[in-house]
Image (cartoon, coloured by chain):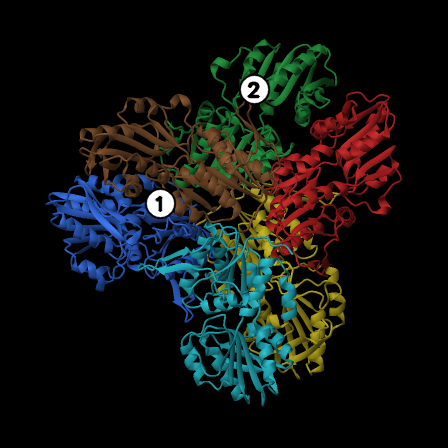
Chain colours: A brown, B blue, C green, D cyan, E yellow, F red
Amino acid sequence: MAKMFGEMAVFSGRSNRPLAEAICKDLKLTMSEADMIDFPNENIFLQLKCSVRGQDVFLIQGLSVPVNRNLVEMFVFLDALKRASAGRITIVIPFYAYGRSDKKDQPRVPITARLLADLIVTAGADRYMTVDLHAGQIQGFFSIPGDEFTAFPILSDYLVEQKIPNAVVVAADLGFAKKARNFARRLDVPLAFVEKRRIGNDPNAQALTIIGDVENKNVILVDDEVDTAGTLVEAIQLVKRNGARQIFSVCTHATLSHPAVERLRAAPIEEFVCTDTVPIPPERHLPNFKILSVAPLLAETIARTHAGRSVGEYLHDTQ
Amino acid sequence: MAKMFGEMAVFSGRSNRPLAEAICKDLKLTMSEADMIDFPNENIFLQLKCSVRGQDVFLIQGLSVPVNRNLVEMFVFLDALKRASAGRITIVIPFYAYGRSDKKDQPRVPITARLLADLIVTAGADRYMTVDLHAGQIQGFFSIPGDEFTAFPILSDYLVEQKIPNAVVVAADLGFAKKARNFARRLDVPLAFVEKRRIGNDPNAQALTIIGDVENKNVILVDDEVDTAGTLVEAIQLVKRNGARQIFSVCTHATLSHPAVERLRAAPIEEFVCTDTVPIPPERHLPNFKILSVAPLLAETIARTHAGRSVGEYLHDTQ
Amino acid sequence: MAKMFGEMAVFSGRSNRPLAEAICKDLKLTMSEADMIDFPNENIFLQLKCSVRGQDVFLIQGLSVPVNRNLVEMFVFLDALKRASAGRITIVIPFYAYGRSDKKDQPRVPITARLLADLIVTAGADRYMTVDLHAGQIQGFFSIPGDEFTAFPILSDYLVEQKIPNAVVVAADLGFAKKARNFARRLDVPLAFVEKRRIGNDPNAQALTIIGDVENKNVILVDDEVDTAGTLVEAIQLVKRNGARQIFSVCTHATLSHPAVERLRAAPIEEFVCTDTVPIPPERHLPNFKILSVAPLLAETIARTHAGRSVGEYLHDTQ
Amino acid sequence: MAKMFGEMAVFSGRSNRPLAEAICKDLKLTMSEADMIDFPNENIFLQLKCSVRGQDVFLIQGLSVPVNRNLVEMFVFLDALKRASAGRITIVIPFYAYGRSDKKDQPRVPITARLLADLIVTAGADRYMTVDLHAGQIQGFFSIPGDEFTAFPILSDYLVEQKIPNAVVVAADLGFAKKARNFARRLDVPLAFVEKRRIGNDPNAQALTIIGDVENKNVILVDDEVDTAGTLVEAIQLVKRNGARQIFSVCTHATLSHPAVERLRAAPIEEFVCTDTVPIPPERHLPNFKILSVAPLLAETIARTHAGRSVGEYLHDTQ
Amino acid sequence: MAKMFGEMAVFSGRSNRPLAEAICKDLKLTMSEADMIDFPNENIFLQLKCSVRGQDVFLIQGLSVPVNRNLVEMFVFLDALKRASAGRITIVIPFYAYGRSDKKDQPRVPITARLLADLIVTAGADRYMTVDLHAGQIQGFFSIPGDEFTAFPILSDYLVEQKIPNAVVVAADLGFAKKARNFARRLDVPLAFVEKRRIGNDPNAQALTIIGDVENKNVILVDDEVDTAGTLVEAIQLVKRNGARQIFSVCTHATLSHPAVERLRAAPIEEFVCTDTVPIPPERHLPNFKILSVAPLLAETIARTHAGRSVGEYLHDTQ
Amino acid sequence: MAKMFGEMAVFSGRSNRPLAEAICKDLKLTMSEADMIDFPNENIFLQLKCSVRGQDVFLIQGLSVPVNRNLVEMFVFLDALKRASAGRITIVIPFYAYGRSDKKDQPRVPITARLLADLIVTAGADRYMTVDLHAGQIQGFFSIPGDEFTAFPILSDYLVEQKIPNAVVVAADLGFAKKARNFARRLDVPLAFVEKRRIGNDPNAQALTIIGDVENKNVILVDDEVDTAGTLVEAIQLVKRNGARQIFSVCTHATLSHPAVERLRAAPIEEFVCTDTVPIPPERHLPNFKILSVAPLLAETIARTHAGRSVGEYLHDTQ
């Protein structure tokens, strides 16, 4: 197999350093460092602490809160790497922001998910890696090659181990219907949906219905992201009213914006299963949280990308 | 309101000339013409028959069969318009091809829907207009401004007029779940799904299930496109087995590849309601077809685009 | 004179709305509005409240604190305008951030001022306008046409009116030497410099010297920006030790990062003269502040740009 | 010599698989494979069957009939290779289409040969290789590096071996005059031309004249391409009327559109000498056809390109 | 007809100011002026003397000697116009340099004619106009729209008026064969060629032959350009040896590099007919020169381009 | 350390061949050659004499007189290298022209320093290297990575060796104030300035003042470039009038346009210390010239760039 670039170097911005460290540990590699300082005027100063000339650089930077700081830091970091003559720059984005801004579904709105992809390329990225985009089509927003991985096999493997009897997978968002079907197939259980329908022209008046059967079943609610947990909590109330027993909540990205933690604490959830694509500080970590790591997945694909070995085969075997 | 470009000129490629003529009729405009000749070696010769210097040109060319000819003809047409110094070129694509190739859902496949968008821009388009993309995110594949319209209000208005009692909207494809929900809301009827799940690792072994209730109901099967009608016919059989009464099939794009017409002829469909985004030659026109025209929609938005008047407001009122 | 685009529309992001309102008032124009909402996950939602099809749009958004939010909001706003088919988009940046990151003066640092220019173009700007860049060369970082204005004539006109006897202009930063010379020429007074020189290899050990004569003189300290006021206060102490009498501090951009206000309150400054390119909230407004507005300057140049009339002539007359 | 990329991989589209196989055989390399399927709606599905990460990929795809299918397939193939992270992609185009659409020689026509070059680059090619372009200037239509080879030395070597006495080279198209001169020089024989001149303003009324001497000579008619063979047959009649003896027809690209085979069968041609840049199916293969292969030429240049060895020297020695 | 840009403004670089003045006179327009100064270090300083905001600017600058100065001046001029916010910039290049560097006909040479086109676009041109390119394909080197005009109708009209009896058109360069044919057709006279063939491998040993009949005829030698007149003088000697009577030399571009004037003075030429695309200073002006102006042609097409009227129709009528 | 490209190859244009030869000697490398011919029409013909396929090419070409020829030759050379499939092309520009055209400090002027950077990238450069730009911000005009080196450590090391007693560094241009400060710090001597101020509105009436103390001191006048030496000679007269003793003139780039040599010959300069970034022909070489070579600096950084070793560390150690 060909090794096309210089040594591998892994850098991390400030968005999710624990994940970056776990990846480097898996890669048995010392993380490359950079000074990152917020000046009093909030301008970010950044200086790489080692040469990257010709190297095969991976920069790990997710787009969770503080989103704007993390985004601008990503741009600045990419520019520094490019102007320092890195051989190839792969931006690793464990969590991609603005995933819901992926089309003009109202007049005169931006398509921010496409905009970000263009800005990332302008700033200097040669390739990208990311995990569970809100819509797979966002891949096509990038003009550079890249790989989207899914953490759902990690999540479903865990649930299979839990041997939940009489389970049903429920998608709380119809936009997630197809992925929920695939998830249900992995667990070999049936599927149901929560339909949220606006009533009249009032955007706040909404009717919720269950399509499919949840009565006397243990419900596994799946989504790509749990943010304020508002939709999740509504869905839990609905399935409970329809006779559901235990509730499991499963997602890749636990962004947990306020008041998510309070809502989750109050909700009758058996287990909240997520990954570490977004860092969850200890104070937001509830007893029923199960956080699975995507570090082995990302480490292996980084290693294969660097070595020019097939990523597709690995994903096929594991995903 | 500002009029920013020269006179409006509407051209048509060979893919859907009846629609282009209907649009011009609505616009009370004589269609601008071009010679288009296939040489014996299949190379397309194209020459505009009038000056387009500085004009505000709209080229209507859909991407139905023959797809490759229509696509290359679109590129050649755009190049001719650009090199003839058109002031602004809007490509109007009533039916966009390769909509299902919108992400890498398998290793080592292209994202052809993004590729086409890039090629169209390279060939010379300044703006685009299109109708009911397979995924709204394809808007974000374009680096140029544009508008996607939906024909579903036209379709739902027609069905409301039919006063179908005890109806249920059924989506045969889970990827269409959200749009089916919106459609059901317009008709104010419930929603159900056909779930197609692969069994084991055999891609051909599939189980179909109904999620939701169709018993004794008049079923309205909706999708963006009906191609070979294979999925449609399976869905019809399934809902029939589950006690459905009358069946209506509704879609924007009736591409009707072989053997769609034979299947539709044999299927117990009350009415097949579609639009003219794809031309349906008379010999494929079954007695239970109802073809609604998108020409008024496209004509009005072309007129507004040319005049610099709001398209969003018009869509809000009508859609 | 030619009017090349549709109607003029002026929008404002959230960075400096008072300035935008003053500009619109001068232009006798109602500001165009957009919804701007920070979602709980900090993602910015933006929707234009009126059509901009073909219009000649000016978006006013400076890059003061919160810098990252203002920057991302600028990108998102530009994308919305572009995809809403604005005829021409001029980004008006009263204060440009990252002006000191304008070259690689250390190894492995970015050139963020160039990066921003590229990102702004990628996001959709067709032209730019800005005021007193940290280095005039930043104009050349833009690949789009634009205009940099200087507020120094406004500042010097004010000082001339104050009839300060026996004055000397002092530049606290040698990088500002040439502009300080021009400023001194407008006031027709002599010039001196504060030289800051690192001692040995310790970056924190610095020697300050006066080059030129300040004894018994009224000192006018000029710079493009006062941020934490650290350099300014050192310079004041130095000129005082060298026999200066009254001190005036003059700058275009009063970014006033912490602890600037405390420092300015404690310093023996007769008057602190600046402009409104950066908004100064009332609670930071000290009694000896004199804030001059750049709104008439920007309003006139926006009007001339829209009408296709010469901006250079106006600047020549006033600057 | 440097080897800059990963392993070499040679793929072939469906346009000229026999040539691709001959090249791989010469390279002693197993061809890399891809699934290529035409869906019922004519959309092309393509999936690479092996990893190309970092590899030095050569895709062989000519643009003979079906031209549009072959062109779109080329674009889709390039996109799949690019998104699968190939290290370098060289498109090998044994026969380039639209060569006669290389300038605006009439108002309002496209320059399709330039358009294709741009589309090929947009789709993902890093380099190109091609054989005997209709005009050498088409090289300059590509913004990427590349090599044009000529098969005329292969053709002239063959003719020299035939020891044709008293020969004259005749160009049937004045645009081929210079290349015909070079060909005549290789054979060390004189040169003559067929002049085709339009009479009056009727584009169909044409006068043919011989410029130069063919009487009692064996005529070798050369051109880059024989398509419908109409011009060729007219030229044969003319030289025969002017006293020519035996006729040899020589070209690189035997595209042979209808009714070329019928015309060639009927014409008094001693031998029709061409290459395999365009596949000639057995049923179109006449007894007097001599097809020389460009496979060794392309194989050697592919090997040299991959190894970073000089192509120019090889061409100088052989061409 | 639409008028899409601001007022028309015509500027001229220093390469061919007499032509630019003649064009402005035809347009009844005062030429717009710019200061152009060569600093002692040869850097060119340029400043436009009037505003061009939004205007429809035509910059006339040919690429004759001093070629490098004229080329760099063109780039600098374009940049000044772009940054001064011209509405549209058309570069008018009466004579395009490097026309013979239009393909890689030897290994490791540039394609300078394409390079220039790219540089011109980078510098800021939106459109181009030019006259009689060495190869029409150079049109395709531009990624911007443009028009190539031919001066041959002007030249042939003049010759028709001269009523030269028993004439024959002779092309001294086989690359000019097709255009010579068209020229002969306009004069309704026969055609002949000078064939120049290298002997052996010595690039300096060349054999010249006449193909066609010139005996007792008045020979009209045509080419696009006469540079050193070496080829021309060889051709004259050859046709004279073959019995030609009077000699007329006709070309569009009389670049007349040393020692062209000496050679032309010594040669038995009845009349040397050319145009003013390249300025001929009075001291190089021989008594038998007839210089026809392209100013009316360029003025009319500039006027039509500005007004958005058809150029193709005008050319069809006149060319 | 990784070696990412093929063999290193160093080429030189005609601008500063002695420097290129010194660099190659330091690198113990035979310079790669190209034919460069000025045709009679001044078009430059260029052909590389060896293959560069995949190689890591460094082209040395400064932009001193003849500037336009050297610039166009650089473009043509880059195009030839790119089309000959060089692996990576680094343009080494020992002296960059048009450094003073780095902003629009007057209306309607170009920013030629940015324009050149764009043209160089368009022509094919992948990276750049240069020495002592007139303004460091010009680095940001390049969209490609690169390195600016400074020769001032070479110059200051030399002056330190000279042990000049009682010295003062004087900057004759306030735009050079900050660099002069750094230079003074290296010599550990004080700093003074020449202030040149326009009087009234007459651009030719200027007053010169010394800011700082030069009485009885040995003055070291520093600047980046000495061109006509006009400013230098004025500064010498001024410091002499203010009591200076010996005068040393120091600069990186001795472009020495007419009448610099005459002025320098007449001026009371102890020593004129410069580098070889611009070639000084023997006839312009005065007895008090000391020319220090940048060849070792450029050779080492070329070697490190090729090997992928840190350039920053080397510069930190030496600069």
The residue at which mark 2 appears reads as C274
Q: Mark 1 lies on which chain?
A: B
Count every numbered label the image shows and give the total.
2
Is residue F196 shown to the viewer in this render?
Answer: no
Q: What residue do we see at 65% from left, 73% from top?
A: E172
- Callout 1 secondary element: strand
- The quarter of the displayed image where residue C215 is located: top right
E189 shown above or below E22:
below
Of F314 and E243, nearer the camera is: F314
Q: Do labels 1 and 2 share a chain?
A: no
Q: Could you tell whether B250 is left or right of F220 in the image?
A: left
Q: Identity of the amino acid at label 2?
A: Cys
Q: Identity of the amino acid at label 1?
A: Asp
Q: Which chain carries label 2?
A: C
Q: Nearer the viewer, mark 1 or mark 2?
A: 1
Q: Distance between the residues labelled 1 and 2?
A: 45 Å
- Callout 2 secondary element: strand
Q: How crowded is mark 1: few (under 14 residues within 10 Å), some or many (20 or more)?
A: many
E307 shown above or below F140:
below
Q: How crowded is mark 2: few (under 14 residues within 10 Å), some or many (20 or more)?
A: many
B2 shown above or below D190:
above
| Marker disc for residue D150 | none
**Residue F7, horizontal then vertical, whole percent:** 67, 52
The residue at which mark 1 appears reads as B147
Of F153 and E300, nearer the camera is: F153
Q: Quadrant of the C terminus of chain A?
A: top left
**Residue A142, horizontal then vertical, whole percent:** 45, 44
**Residue E284, horizontal then vertical, whole percent:** 74, 62
Q: Which residue lies furthest to the right in this view?
A: F287
**Residue F199, horizontal then vertical, whole percent:** 72, 27
Of F307 and B219, nearer the camera is: F307
